Image (tube, grey):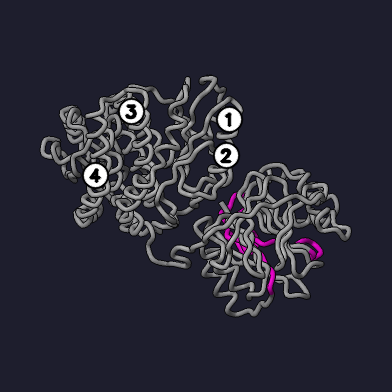
Amino acid sequence: MCGIVGYVGNSEVVKALIKGLEALEYRGYDSAGIAVHTGKEILVEKKAGRLSNLKEALRRREIVGRCGIGHTRWATHGAATDENAHPFLSVHRRFAVVHNGIITNYLPLKRELAARGISLRSDTDSEIIAHLIDLFYDGDVLAAIASVVRRLEGSFALAILAASEPNALYGVRKESPLLVGRGRGECFLCSDVSGFSENCTEVAFPNDEVIVRLTERGAKAYDLDGKSLPLAFARTECHRSMEGSEECCMLSEIHEVPASVEKTLRSYPEEVVARLLREEHDEIAILGCGSAYHAGLAFKATMRELAGVRVTDYVASEFLTERYVGGEHPLFIVVSQSGETADTLRAVKRAKEHGATILAVTNVATSSLVRLADETVLTGCGTERAVAATKSYSAQVAALLRICLQYADIWGKIEKTELARYLAELSALPHKAATVLEGERTLADACRRLANASALYCLGKGADYAAAKEGSLKIKEVSYLFSEAYPSGELKHGTLALMEAGVYALFVATDPRLTEKTASSIAEVACRGASTFAIASEGSAERLGADEVYPIPDTIPAFSPVLSTVAMQLIAYYVGIYRDCDVDRPRNLAKSVTVE
């Protein structure tokens, strides 16, 4: 979850670090800090809370240098306090360390340090790393880092300063992202490419347990025995989007849904995907976490309805602990906005151990998922900074729908005339999504009432249920209103007991074949005193009988999640605003989940 940045070069390091942290703040909002080698010593400044708190502290304190590291935190061990903020200085101030990940053998290592008379000043698992490097240091920085890496269990990406080397910084990773960048007379470390300076022209992706040493002259890589390794750089263009912006990102990103869907469909790599889909697979599986998993549920429903194919769906974290009983040569379609989700990456590795072919759907071309996958479909979203997935979810669903249609065509599951109709409707989705957005003011007014609900239940059938799950997640993420999703047919099997005055039931009803069933469910809820709201296709809206109905354009029912979830994203946003929530940066959450 945390963001790491490192810089060494000819520019003023504090400015370079802060610009990098501004681009990475989406990875964690609990605290931020920097460590700078002044040429004489390592100085640290860190503050709990938003990056703005650190910037204010630095206005009052002059720190000058050409080499440093920075960190923005999402807490896993220890509360969000100044003491628990990174970087951490070692006991003799000889090393400063920032860390992304979780050290699973933290407690025995802490006890070992205590036995040597070293007590921690924080409640984190990260501070032990700085003290251990200091403990193993005998004049060889590289050897000390290697000794500690051998001791650490869990996942980590580290950036390290050594007091003995004023013009160098070190990095090492294991199952957490860390990239190396270089430009003319400067080098960079970063958790992802968005944090690199526009002066960075080349990027390298070190393997696990490879130590990199960066100076203004370049970067070198070493294994844990100190043997030199090649470090392959590739040309890149680094662009920072909305760096340091305090404006609302979520609303602007919802408004970017039509363009994101259009770009994703336009850039769809048909021939690349066809090579995988033509292979014989004894199982097709969809895998992801959170919104990415919900996008997969929409794919699952579409494959069943349009291609007559059963798809296995896996939550990545559950897949890691379940016994795998699938096929011997499965196709896993893996969905992740960042391509760095820890559970997803580990699940991919496990799937490959079982002979799986991996087709990735992701938004980041430089991500770890892309490097693990056999082929990739990139979504055309650009940077998404708000924690809640909006345009990225819609683009993922669009890409997955296109995969479904291509599979159905290759395997003769669909008539050519029907395929042409579906493809035409898919191409129309960006325009129809824009139409959904035109009613924003109407939805905003309705959300004033929804914001006062004691609880909200999102209900639907088929693809509408997949959309209801995603909408419910958005609402709970950004408004903290209790919200759950259920198949509407399950109301009488428990959920109906919760319907009473003050409760809202939000129905997603876009399939005209199910209008009468949905109307019956709405009536059952209403007679218990709960309020009802429906997001419905234009052709069904008047027949539902809900207290309020928001109509969206008609489309093929399996495609409807691209449209209905835009309305639900707006609902989540406005309910959050009316409940005085920080919709861009919800409490306890961060954009990229790089720890299990």
Stretch in magenta: 66-94
Q: Earlier in the sequence, mark 4 or mark 3?
A: 3
Residue named by callout 3: 409
Q: What secondary structure is marked by label 3?
A: helix
Rendered position, 199 above or below 315: below
505 or 162, which is in the foreground? 162
Where on the picture, by quarter, is residue 216? Answer: bottom right
Residue named by callout 1: 352
Mark 2–mark 4 CB contact (< 8 Å) = no
Question: How far apart are the alpha carbons under marks 3 and 1?
Answer: 27 Å
Mark 4 is on which residue type? Ala
Residue 444 in view in this figure: yes
Residue 254: where, in percent of width, then height?
Answer: 33, 54
Q: Nearer the viewer, mark 4 or mark 3?
A: 3
Quick one: quadrant of the C terminus?
top right
**Residue occupying the far front of the picture:** 271
* Disc 3 crowd, CA 10 A, few/some/many (<14, 14-19, 20+): some
Residue drawn 60% across the image and 59% down it: 202
523 or 128, which is in the foreground? 128
Q: Earlier in the sequence, mark 3 or mark 2?
A: 2
Name the disc covering residue 372, or none: 2
24 or 12, which is in the foreground? 12
Residue 430: where, in percent of width, then height?
Answer: 27, 48
Dominant secondary structure of the residues highlighted in magenta in the image: loop
Where on the picture, by quarter, is residue 141? Answer: bottom right
